[in-house]
Amino acid sequence: MCDKCYGEDVGGILVNELESAPAVAAIRCRGLRKVYPGGTAAVQGLDLDIARGEFFGLLGPNGAGKTTTVGMLTTRTVPTGGDVWIGGLDVRKQAVAVKRIIGVVTQFNTLDRRLTAWENLYYHGRYFGMSGRDSRQEADRILDLVRLRDRAKEHIESLSGGMQQRLLIGRALVHHPEVLFLDEPTTGIDPQGRLALWEILLQLHDEGQTVLLTTHYMDEAERLCQRIAVMDRGVILALGSADELKRTVGAETIVTLHAEPVNEGLIAALRNVPQVRSVEAGPRGLQVFAGASPGLVAQVAEAAVRSGVELKDLSVSNPTLETVFIKLTGRELRE
């Protein structure tokens, strides 16, 4: 069995080497694949090691393969090929044992609407074989953790979307899972609800919980995750910390221009500015990737005006996760 996935040049950006994992990683995949009937390859040969206690993020656009990956890791989707272990247990051969050591929050709300918030937690504990006393204690503890103690006796319909999402995460923690899987948990939640969830998740991580999070929110991945894998079309394109990923852009400064018309003369003029490394169309205008050079902005503006275009706006920024994401996955809309 291979212990390393060697770097591959994908669109000019190097996929980080996966170092040999400890004997028992929280999550280990080798050659994991999923091809659906009709030939759609959702995941293509995934190699991944996630350490115990790590907060790991899968970042990618819609259709990248994130949800399918989580489905295979949590026994809900049968792989087409490859191997995967959770806490040293073979997911294919020991599925029942795996289910006992994981907590899963999917994109769907699976709370029992006939029960109160407290009852959802209590009966989850009983389902996992906990005694009545332990289940009661855990239900009380989790309500405190997810800031819902005052809503214990309320039925699900009376809780806001953010409260329900916090309760879903709490329910997944009742049986003390080794690994917590969160599949886009803040989609559709208002900003205040997202911040509340982030606080809870960071607290869990501080307490040693292993978390795998899928998201398409750049700020969420950067705020929460120690390492991030950028995934698209079933393949991991880059992997590392947020800072490591941003360094792969190969520029310290990004100048964004709004000019009319954008033509070859303008692009050629910008490329001739000292320290400019590349000029590309970006989500908010023409982007100039350059080193950190004194006077760079003035030089870019002067070059644009000299080329005969009308310069309407100009802004300066440093590389962000969004920069990395767009360079790797493209700008086209996804359904």
Image (cartoon, grey):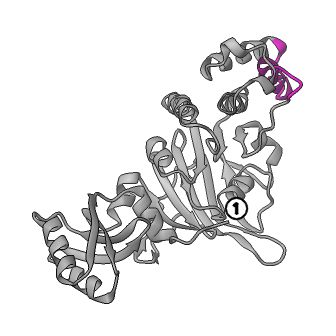
Q: Quadrant of the C terminus?
A: bottom right
* Visible residue check, residue 239: yes
Front in this rendered view, residue 285 or 141: 285
In the rendered image, residue 103, in percent from the top left (x then y), is placed at 71, 37
Q: Is residue 139 left or right of residue 232?
A: right
Q: Main secondary structure of the magenta part?
A: helix
What residue is at 62 percent from the left and 39 percent from the top? 189
Q: Residue furthest left?
A: 294
Residue 87 shows in this picture: no
In magenta segment, residue 213: no
Magenta residues, start to end: 113-132
Quarter of the image where one finds residue 146: top right
Residue under the point 63% across and 47% down: 184
Q: Quadrant of the N terminus?
A: bottom right
Q: Hey, what amino acid is under mark 1?
A: Asp
Q: Position of residue 213 (x, y in %)?
A: 59, 46
Q: Nearer the viewer, residue 268 or 311?
A: 311
- Quarter of the rendering containing residue 323: bottom left
Residue bearing mark 1: 83
Circle 1 SS class: strand
